[in-house]
Image (tube, rainbow, N blue to C red):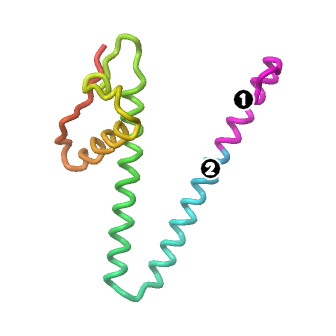
Amino acid sequence: LVFGVSSGQTYARVGKSGRTMRVLRMLRLLRMLRIWQLMAAFTERLQSESLSLALHIAKVTGLMVGWAHLTACIWYGIGAAKGSEDTSWLIEYEFGGRTLGYRYLTSLHWAMSQYTGGMDEITPENHR
């Protein structure tokens, strides 16, 4: 995208693309807000108490899984961001050679286990 351009123009294009990405992320958040409003409108029109209860349980479960996803991504990011001398949980438990999906599911398992008091076989390990 930016090859063969002088350095001043390169930085300008990178700055504009960063701004564009922020705007796109904000639009995605607005879409999530719209979905939340649609769910609220749908809930108001429900006549069945049991269906309303099931929808409420599904919303709370979705919120918990979403929060666990965010926590898992942050925890994985902390483990993956290491210096040359650091040891992280990825190295300590030898997850470096595993697939990204396996490492993500391990992070998600750790994050969800924090809801129950944190009893898990994998613990944070960052040493200098």
Is the stretch drawn in magenta largely helix, strand or loop?
A: helix
Q: Position of residue 28 (x, y in %)?
A: 60, 53
Q: Position of residue 71 (x, y in %)?
A: 37, 42
Identify the element where label 1 is drawn: helix
The residue where tag 1 is placed is 14
Q: Dividing the image into 4 quarters, which one contains the C terminus? A: top left
Q: Position of residue 85 (x, y in %)?
A: 35, 11
Q: Nearer the viewer, residue 2 or 117?
A: 2
**Residue at the limit of the structure toward the top, as seen here:** 85
**Residue at the limit of the structure toward the bottom, as seen here:** 47
Q: Dividing the image into 4 quarters, which one contains the N terminus? A: top right
- CB contact under 8 Å: marks 2 and 1: no
Give the quarter of the image for residue 98.
Answer: top left
Give the quarter of the image for residue 5.
Answer: top right
Question: The residue under label 2 is which amino acid type?
Answer: Met
Going by the image, does 77 lie left or right of 121?
A: right
**Residue at 77% of width from left, 30% of height from top?**
13
**Residue at 70% of width from left, 41% of height from top?**
20
Question: The residue under label 1 is which amino acid type?
Answer: Val
Above or below residue 29? Residue 57 is: below
Closer mark to the observer between disc 2 and disc 1: 1
Above or below residue 49? Residue 62 is: above
How many numbered discs sit on the rendered protein?
2
Q: Residues within 10 Å of mark 1 (few under 14, many from 20)?
A: few
The residue where tag 2 is placed is 26
Magenta part of the chain: 1-22
